[in-house]
Image (cartoon, grey):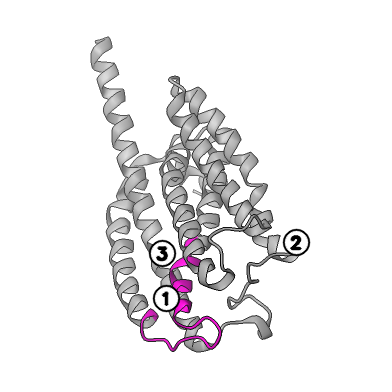
Amino acid sequence: MGARNHNKNPFDFLANPERFMAFSRWAAPMFGAIAGVLAVVGLILTFTVPEDYQQGDTVRMMFIHVPAAVLAMFVYLCLGIASFLALVFRHALADAAAQACAPLGAAFTVLALATGSLWGKPMWGTWWVWDARLTSVLVLLLFYLGYLALRGGIDDEQKAARAAAILALVGVINLPIVKFSVDWWNSLHQGSSTLLAKPENRLPAVYAWPMLVMQLAYLSAFGALWLVRIRALVWRRKARSLALKAAEA
């Protein structure tokens, strides 16, 4: 028993679709329900917080924009990790996880850019500026779109997966640029004001709590959608494999 546990691969979960399907069968709806409850609470808080003395009523856009921007980077990190595991360890489920999360990450990035423009217009007087933060987030979107284009544009599925995984790993370099762009270069974009920021830059509690609730809502929604999309890919690949076996027979 001891030898078996000692030799156990820590990535066995990713190599065992049956175990994943059993887990995701109850985890996906659970995360979905949590996301729904948190989103309702978060939106209520969003529309009941006081106006900001500088931004006025526009401050409410922050509770939509900031979680989307955070998820855009977090999902890409998940894409990079899954792509690494698929490329190095040849885990089919890791490849499915990478393929499943890319469209979700692209959607969060589009939402972050769109809401950022809506927020920036009254604050900066323009819809868009080519500063470091906005430009690096746009580059992040291009990496997502490039990944999706490679997955869909190459007929050989294995070659497509490998090429897309390599591109995803290259794109990981952009994540610290997005994160620290405000600190490294002059930018109109404000710096971090989350709980991890310096005390003098942190949001007041009246804004911090709605932000936390909305962040958890976004994260739970991503977890639910990611699991559902991975399950769909597993079923699709299994159906394709059975069809090929039937054709060969």
Q: Is residue 60 magenta?
A: yes
Mark 1 vs mark 2, foreground winner is 2
* Type of amino acid at the residue the image marks with label 3: Tyr
Q: What residue is shown with label 3?
A: 218
- The part of the image, by quadrant, that contains residue 169 is top right
Q: Point out the residue furthest to the front here.
A: 125
Residues tagged 1 and 3 counted as in contact (Cβ below 8 A): no
Mark 3 vs mark 2, foreground winner is 2
Q: Residues within 10 Å of mark 2 (few under 14, many from 20)?
A: few
* Type of amino acid at the residue the image marks with label 2: Trp
Q: CA distance from mark 1 to mark 2?
A: 30 Å
> In this rendering, is residue 238 above or below 82?
above
Read off the magenta span: 46-68
x 45%, y 34%: residue? 92
Which of marks 2 and 1 precedes in the sequence?
Answer: 2
Q: What residue is shown with label 1?
A: 213
* Type of amino acid at the residue the image marks with label 1: Val
Q: Residues within 10 Å of mark 3 (few under 14, many from 20)?
A: many
Q: Which mark is residue 91?
A: none
Q: Residues within 10 Å of mark 1 (few under 14, many from 20)?
A: many
Q: Which mark is residue 185?
A: 2
